[in-house]
Amino acid sequence: MLSSFFAATVRHRRIVLVVETVLAAVFVVVESRTRAFTWIVFPWLIVAAMVCLVLVIVVQKSQRPAGLTVRPDGSSFDTPVSPLTIFLFTGYVGIAMVNTTSLVRSLGEGEEWWQLDAALIILYLVVLALWFRAGWDHVGVRLRRDGVLDRGPAGSLFVPWEAFDLHYPAWPADRGDRLRLNYEGPARVRGITRRRFVTGVNVDRWFLAGAIEHYVTHPKHRAAIGTEAEYRRLMQALASPAEQHA
C-alpha cells in the first residue's frame, strides 16, 4: 500500500507542488490582511508536518531498489525518482507559510528590525525554491555516455569517465546514503562544488557503485548508455561477476 502511495506521489509530484505553492501564496496574502485563519489552519499544518516527517523516515529506512531507469530520450540511466523531496517540501511549506505570514504582517505594521523580517522571508523563499526545484525536476545521479552527473537542489557535479580511478572509482560511504567518488584531476570535474560524494537517495548504493565501476572499466559499452538493450546487458553483467569482466 505504501509503495503504491509513494509511486502515485512521484507520478503526480508536479501537480502536488503547484497546488501547494498556490495555496500557500493565497494564504499568505489573505491572512496577512485578515488574520482570520491562522488559528484554524495552524493545528492542521502541525499534523501535516508530523505526517510528512514520518513518511520521510519511512522512505529513508526502506530498502533502495537495485536498478536504474532508462531516460525517455535515450541519453542516460537515471536513479529512480524519490518521493522524499515531495514530503520534505510539503512539511516545510506549511510551517514556512505561517511564519512568512507573521513576518509580512510585521513589515506592514512598520515594526522595528524590519530588515531581519525581510531577510527571513527571503530565506524562506530560497529554501522553498530549492525544494520545489528538487521535487519538480529529477535530482539524482545520471550515468551518461560521457560521465556521471549528480544533480542536486543547489547545484550539480559532473565527473567524466576518464577522470575516475580505475581501481576504486566509487564505493558507499561509512554512513548515510552517500556514495564516495574517487577521481583524479579535479580540474576536469565540473560543478558548483568539487565534492567527492553523491547522494543515492532512491537507489542501492552498492548497485550504483557497481554500475559506475562497470563503465569505468568497460569503456566500449559507454556509447550505448541510455538504450534499453544496454540497460538489460548492464543488469546481466552486474548480476554475474563472470560477465562483468567481459
Image (spheres, rainbow, N blue to C red):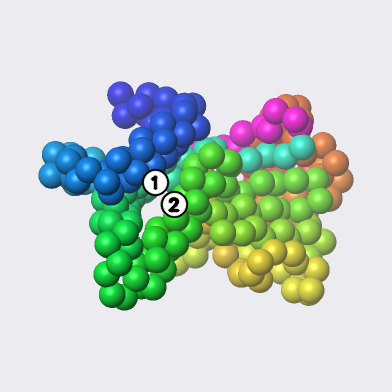
Q: Which residue is mark 2?
A: 128
Quadrant location of the C terminus in the rendered image? top right
Q: Residue at x 30, y 67 (%)?
A: 110
221 left or right of 11? right
Quadrant location of the N terminus in the rendered image? top left
62 left or right of 230? left
Can see residue 51? Answer: no
Q: Residue at x 32, y 59 (%)?
A: 108
Where is residue 154 shown, x and y percent of the image?
A: 56, 59
> Label for residue 89?
1
Q: Residues within 10 Å of mark 1 (few under 14, many from 20)?
A: many
Which contiguous range is marked in magenta? 65-74
Q: Residue at x 47, y 28 (%)?
A: 15
Question: In the rendered view, would you say 110 is above or below 66?
Answer: below
Q: Amino acid at mark 2?
A: Leu
The reply to whether the magenta stretch includes residue 243 is: no
Where is residue 238 shown, x and y percent of the image?
A: 64, 42
Question: In the rendered view, would you say 33 is above or below 189?
Answer: above
42 left or right of 70? left
Can see residue 125? Answer: yes
Task: Report how far apart the C-alphas of labels 2 and 1 lie in the structure.
Answer: 7 Å
Where is residue 137 shown, x and y percent of the image?
A: 58, 41
Please name the predominant secondary structure of the magenta segment in the image.
loop
Q: Amino acid at mark 1?
A: Phe
